[in-house]
Image (cartoon, grey):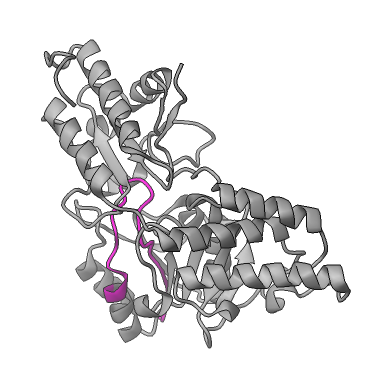
């Protein structure tokens, strides 16, 4: 049986071989980066090198980078560390933002999945200076947000801006200072690094209060001994991602094929600018859970929405915020390619999706029809 086709990179991207090798070497070397002896200094040098690599991916200074345990912690650090009592978030944010700020004011999005800028301007101007938290790219639909314009409007109201760039980094160009944001969250395992390591970028001169107390690591911004091997893997993956950003050719080919098989299929967010690797698409009349299981049996791995709910498939808050009906949202799956995806992988997905669509009686397209 052929190896499984993995098209769920937005959940986690397989570890890049170069990152794996570098992590093994770091584990062999050992050492605590806070120690002053030779082994400790070598560990510190590895962390510093990785800091430069990750910072370069997003146009930041190495000193602006604070390593964390992942994107969730980075988001929580930004929301707590800004010291702003008032918080505004978009309706399509990741749960690590929404649940970290349960009293936040929610800004609606258009049906395209793009934030309603007029509503945002009204809300941000209507109270005390806030912290605004808006993701750069949505994890379910891939829709990109107009962060530079959000920053421009926020500045008029004296607001700070946090951007969750976890899904965007390594897929599209990301530049901290070009965007103008104050805080930027990153995660290693979304771009071929290891799970369990991420970073918060804090722009120079912006206030940040650490919420973890201890030994003063990360320039007193996050206490705790650094995960040297994980950080090294993050650095190598970031450098590789920077050298080869994603292209939209596979995504566009996939979407054209699925729409030819099922003209009623809807690609959510297609009218907006999106990540080049992400397709959120409905199969009319077939539940998302059924699709995920059937495709898995065919050796193709995709997901139904975000992979942050203990393996459960439930109603998508993102699609609901976009005005998608429960019935249509319930038939939507997410397909996300990555650094090791090939045209043959997309071909297998198309064939398996077509076979399922024919099998459940939704189409009379012959199986011999070209995908």
Tell me residue 37's x, y (percent).
Answer: 88, 74
Where is 196 relative to 162, above or below?
above
Q: Where on the picture, by quarter, is residue 258?
A: top left
Q: Residue at x 70, y 67 (%)?
A: 46
Tell me residue 328's x, y (percent).
Answer: 23, 32
Where is 244 relative to 342, above or below?
below
The reply to whether residue 66 is visible in this rendering is no
360 or 2: which is nearer to us?
Answer: 2
Where is 158 relative to 254, above or below?
below
The reply to whether residue 61 is visible in this rendering is yes
Identify the magenta region.
128-149
263 or 42: which is nearer to us?
Answer: 42
Q: Where on the picture, by quarter, is residue 207?
A: bottom right
Tell how many labels.
0
Quadrant for the C terminus, please: top left
Left or right of 48? Residue 199 is: left
Tell me residue 196's x, y (percent).
Answer: 63, 51
Q: Residue at x 60, y 80 (%)?
A: 63
Tell me residue 122's x, y (percent).
Answer: 25, 73
Classified by dominant secondary structure, the portion drawn in magenta counts as: loop
Left or right of 40? Residue 143 is: left
Q: Residue at x 43, y 43 (%)?
A: 340
167 or 289: which is nearer to us?
Answer: 167
Q: Where on the picture, by quarter, is residue 8?
A: top left
The residue positioned farthest toward the bottom in the image shown: 205
Left or right of 312? Residue 121 is: left
């Amino acid at each position: 049986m052929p190896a499984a086709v993995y098209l769920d990179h937005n959940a986690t991207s397989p570890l890049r071989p170069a990152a794996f090798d570098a992590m093994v070497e770091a584990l062999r070397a050992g050492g605590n980066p806070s120690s002053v002896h030779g082994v400790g200094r070598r560990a510190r040098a590895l962390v510093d090198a990785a800091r430069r690599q990750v910072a370069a991916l997003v146009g930041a200074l190495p000193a602006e980078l604070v390593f964390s345990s992942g994107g969730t912690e980075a988001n929580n650090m930004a929301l707590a560390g800004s010291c702003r009592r008032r918080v505004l978030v978009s309706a399509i944010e990741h749960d690590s933002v929404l649940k970290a700020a349960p009293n936040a004011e929610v800004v609606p999005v258009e049906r395209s999945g793009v934030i309603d800028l007029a509503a945002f301007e009204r809300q941000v101007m209507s109270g005390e200076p806030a912290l605004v938290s808006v993701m750069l790219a949505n994890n379910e639909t891939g829709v990109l947000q107009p962060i530079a314009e959000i920053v421009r409007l926020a500045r008029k109201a004296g607001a700070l801006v946090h951007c969750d760039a976890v899904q965007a980094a390594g897929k599209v160009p990301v530049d901290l200072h070009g965007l103008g944001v104050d805080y930027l969250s990153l995660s290693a395992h979304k771009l071929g690094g290891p799970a369990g390591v991420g970073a918060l970028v804090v722009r120079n001169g912006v206030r940040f209060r650490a919420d973890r107390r201890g030994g003063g690591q990360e320039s007193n911004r996050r206490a705790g001994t650094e995960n040297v091997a994980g950080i090294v893997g993050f650095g190598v993956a970031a450098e590789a991602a920077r050298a080869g950003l994603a292209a939209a050719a596979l995504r566009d080919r996939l979407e054209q094929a699925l729409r030819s098989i099922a003209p009623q299929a809807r690609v959510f967010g297609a009218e907006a600018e999106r990540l080049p690797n992400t397709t959120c698409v409905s199969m009319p009349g077939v539940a998302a859970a059924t699709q995920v299981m059937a495709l898995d049996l065919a050796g193709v791995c995709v997901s139904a929405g975000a992979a942050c709910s203990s393996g459960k498939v439930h109603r998508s808050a993102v699609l609901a915020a976009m005005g998608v009906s429960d019935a249509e949202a319930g038939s939507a799956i997410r397909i996300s390619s990555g650094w090791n995806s090939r045209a043959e992988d997309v071909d297998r997905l198309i064939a398996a999706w077509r076979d399922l669509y024919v099998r459940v009686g939704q189409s009379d397209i012959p199986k011999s029809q070209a995908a």
